[in-house]
């Protein structure tokens, strides 16, 4: 069954605004990862947050993890048109598998 | 680019054809993966290879046949596909078996259309 589920499915904002995407999952995890995909291309890893971490930063990205609520959020601050892409969360247990959600399509207008 | 290459980038084939997708990683990783991405569906894990051994076959039909001759190369052999197999096929690699603690690096994908 699907593990990660992103919300919203689509998000449109103006350049300079912040974008927040949420991810909910169902079972225990080792870590949660966020990926970005430009249209029709491969996924690019953005950030990994472990189950014992609550918040992580990377440049304009901020990820939070609440294991009690089984949820995570990705915040992109001061968005740019180049941030336009689909964003996916993926959960990992101790196996070789990542389970991906359906993604949030972000459109940033100049 | 992430160090994972895939060829061809686009492929159109008939249902009776046999074709192969190729993936190569230049990152020194030990685990490689095939995913299928269809419109409006989550990325589906198809196969996992760890140190050249298949460790996961996610209930994939036998018309898809993977091959991992060494840790740098991964193939997906296709035969007698169906139109619903049309999708973006993504290859990925990770440093060590157990994606639990490692990010995956993806190739650009092969856009497959089955007529």
Image (cartoon, coloured by chain):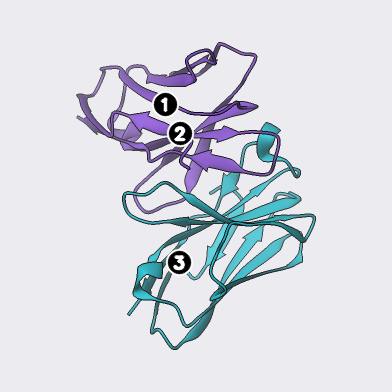
Chain colours: A purple, B cyan
Residue that carries the numbered disc 1 in the rendered image: A23
Q: Which mark is residue B9?
A: 3
Residue at 40% over, 84% down: B15
Residue B58 or A61: which is nearer the viewer?
A: B58
Determine which quarter of the picture holds residue B34: bottom right
Residue at 39% over, 76% down: B82
In this rendering, the label closer to the viewer, 2 or 3: 2
Separation of marks 2 and 1 at Cα, in angstroms:
6 Å
Answer with left or right where residue B31 lies relative to residue B14: right
Numbered disc 1: what chain? A
> Is A91 rendered above or below residue A38?
above
Whether marks 2 and 1 lie on the same chain:
yes
Residue at 46% over, 20% down: A71
Secondary structure of residue under mark 3: loop
Residue B33 or A14: which is nearer the viewer?
A: B33
The x, y position of residue A52, in whole percent, is 65, 14
Q: Count residues near mark 2 (Cα–Cα under 10 Å), then give few for <14, some for 14-19, many for 20+.
A: many
Q: Return the disc, 2 or 1, that comes first in the chain's sequence.
A: 2
Quarter of the image with the C terminus of chain A is top left
* Callout 2–callout 1 Cβ contact below 8 Å: yes
Q: Which mark is residue A4?
A: 2
Secondary structure of residue under mark 2: loop
Whether marks 3 and 1 lie on the same chain:
no
Residue at 42% over, 52% down: A41
Numbered disc 3: what chain? B
Q: Which mark is residue B110?
A: none
The x, y position of residue B98, in whole percent, is 72, 40
Answer with left or right where residue A94 lies relative to residue A100: right
């Amino acid at each position: 069954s699907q593990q990660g589920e992103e919300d919203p499915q689509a998000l449109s904002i103006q350049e300079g605004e912040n974008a927040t995407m949420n991810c909910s999952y169902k079972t225990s995890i080792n870590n949660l990862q966020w990926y970005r995909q430009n249209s029709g291309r491969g996924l690019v890893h953005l950030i990994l947050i472990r189950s014992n971490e609550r918040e992580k930063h990377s440049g304009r990205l901020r990820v939070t993890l609440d294991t009690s609520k089984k949820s995570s959020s990705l915040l992109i601050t001061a968005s740019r048109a180049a941030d336009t892409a689909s964003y996916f969360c993926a959960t990992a247990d101790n196996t070789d598998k990542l389970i991906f959600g359906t993604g949030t399509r972000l459109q940033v207008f100049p | 680019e992430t160090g994972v290459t895939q060829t061809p980038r686009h492929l159109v084939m008939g249902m009776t054809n046999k074709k192969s997708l190729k993936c190569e990683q230049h990152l020194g990783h030990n685990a490689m993966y095939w995913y299928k991405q269809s419109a409006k569906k989550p990325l589906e894990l198809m196969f996992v290879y760890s140190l050249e051994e298949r460790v996961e076959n996610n209930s994939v039909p036998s018309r898809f046949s993977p091959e991992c001759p060494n840790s740098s190369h991964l193939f997906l052999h296709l035969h007698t596909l169906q139109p619903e197999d049309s999708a973006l096929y993504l290859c990925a690699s990770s440093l060590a078996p157990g994606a639990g603690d490692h990010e995956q690096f993806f190739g650009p994908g092969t856009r497959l259309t089955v007529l």
